[in-house]
Image (spheres, rainbow, N blue to C red):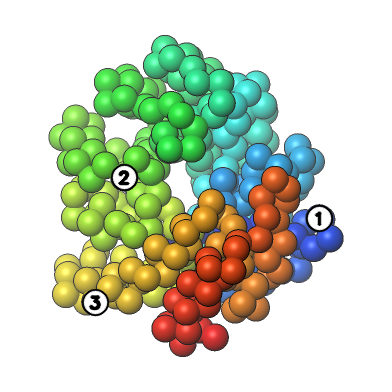
């Protein structure tokens, strides 16, 4: 079972090139904070604009550095089935603990198309697979019926749910049982997601405040609901403002303010506007981070 905090890592850039030094420092910060694992090359890691070579290099670097320290859920999804398969096979060879596979974006496949996409990757790998359902960005949704069918495939062991539908964790638990892993993809409702039947969060906010995120999840799993609620209240503001513009624009800017890496992004993403910058800065000040 994968549970707790998994940080959806940003990809540090400097002059449009991967900033390896800052990435290693980011990993070390996460490990020291006690996260359960990290997710390189997801949407927060700007995977759509990483070259094939960069994607592979970052996955391997992350796995090698984190070995025997924290789990690595490698972001290997693509809207091309063959590309997603090749990257998943590579992550498996490198020793990833699981692959995180987003639904194919832009193509808008049918439910049958989604099934065949994930089944092909499943049938040609030996690594645990976590599905990533985020209809707001991919314009396709994994229906409950499809999820039940996909869960019959032995190594599809969980889902990252970014639907914002808090009725789903309970329904999934009812249909697939406690053993099917459910990780929230929404920082602002991560505690509510756990209460509804989830097992943790793949978190953007944890790039900036990993220790607080870990403390909240740990309190929940220890049965200290009051403490978990108190920490969640501290995280409410930053959980909202880090999504005031398209992810990862705000979190990259926040990372630059706390000294983790530059705010640089790959086009077509650009720096946040002044109003957004002011909100991000205020949230960080309220947490005594700047």
Q: Residue at x 34, y 40 (%)?
A: 163
Disc 1 versus disc 3: distance between alpha carbons? 40 Å
Q: In this rendering, would 7 be left or right of 141?
A: right
Residue 242: x and y in percent read 48, 63
Residue 226: x and y in percent read 16, 75
Q: Residue at x 37, y 23 (%)?
A: 150
Mark 1: give few (<14), some (14-19) or many (20+) Cα within 10 Å. few
Res. 221 visible in picture: yes
Q: In this rendering, would 146 be left or right of 37?
A: left
What element does badge 3 sit on? helix
Tag 3–tag 2 contact (CB < 8 Å): no
Tag 1–tag 2 contact (CB < 8 Å): no
- Between marks 1 and 3 in the image, the one whose residue lies nearer the viewer: 1
Judging by the rendered image, the residue that carries numbered circle 2 is: 164
Judging by the rendered image, the residue that carries numbered circle 3 is: 230
Residue 34: x and y in percent read 45, 71
Q: Earlier in the sequence, mark 3 or mark 2?
A: 2
Q: Earlier in the sequence, mark 1 or mark 3?
A: 1
Mark 2: give few (<14), some (14-19) or many (20+) Cα within 10 Å. some
Q: Earlier in the sequence, mark 1 or mark 2?
A: 1
**Residue 53, image quadrant:** top right
Judging by the rendered image, the residue that carries numbered circle 1 is: 16
Q: Residue at x 52, y 47 (%)?
A: 73
Disc 3 versus disc 2: distance between alpha carbons? 22 Å
- Is 11 drawn above or below residue 286 in the view shown? above
Res. 93 visible in picture: no
- Is 156 drawn above or below residue 265 in the view shown? above
In the image shown, does 69 or 11 lie closer to the viewer?
Answer: 11
What element does badge 1 sit on? loop
Disc 1 versus disc 2: distance between alpha carbons? 33 Å
What element does badge 2 sit on? loop
Residue 275: x and y in percent read 53, 68
């Amino acid at each position: 079972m994968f549970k707790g905090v998994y940080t959806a890592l940003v990809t540090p850039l400097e002059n449009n090139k991967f900033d390896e030094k800052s990435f290693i420092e980011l990993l070390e910060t996460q490990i020291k904070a006690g996260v359960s694992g990290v997710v390189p090359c997801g949407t927060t890691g700007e995977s759509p604009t990483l070259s094939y070579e960069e994607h592979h290099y970052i996955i391997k670097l992350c796995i090698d550095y984190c070995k025997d320290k924290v789990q690595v859920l490698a972001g290997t999804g693509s809207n091309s089935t063959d590309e997603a398969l090749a990257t998943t096979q590579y992550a498996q060879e490198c020793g990833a603990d699981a692959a995180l596979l987003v639904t194919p974006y832009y193509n808008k496949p049918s439910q049958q198309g989604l099934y065949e996409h994930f089944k092909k990757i499943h049938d040609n790998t030996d690594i645990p697979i976590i599905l990533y359902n985020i209809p707001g960005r991919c314009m396709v949704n994994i229906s409950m019926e499809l999820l039940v069918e996909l869960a019959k495939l032995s190594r599809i062991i969980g889902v990252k749910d970014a639907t914002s539908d808090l009725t789903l964790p309970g329904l999934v638990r009812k249909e697939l049982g406690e053993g099917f892993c459910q990780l929230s993809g929404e920082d602002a409702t991560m505690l509510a997601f756990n209460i509804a039947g989830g097992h943790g969060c793949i978190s953007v906010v944890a790039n900036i405040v990993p220790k607080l995120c870990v403390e909240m999840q740990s309190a929940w799993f220890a049965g200290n609901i009051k403490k978990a609620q108190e920490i969640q209240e501290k995280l409410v503001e930053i959980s909202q403002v880090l999504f005031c513009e398209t992810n990862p624009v705000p979190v990259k800017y926040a990372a630059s303010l706390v000294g983790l890496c530059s705010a640089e992004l790959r086009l077509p993403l650009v720096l946040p506007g002044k109003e957004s910058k002011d909100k991000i800065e205020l949230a960080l000040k309220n947490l005594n981070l700047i």
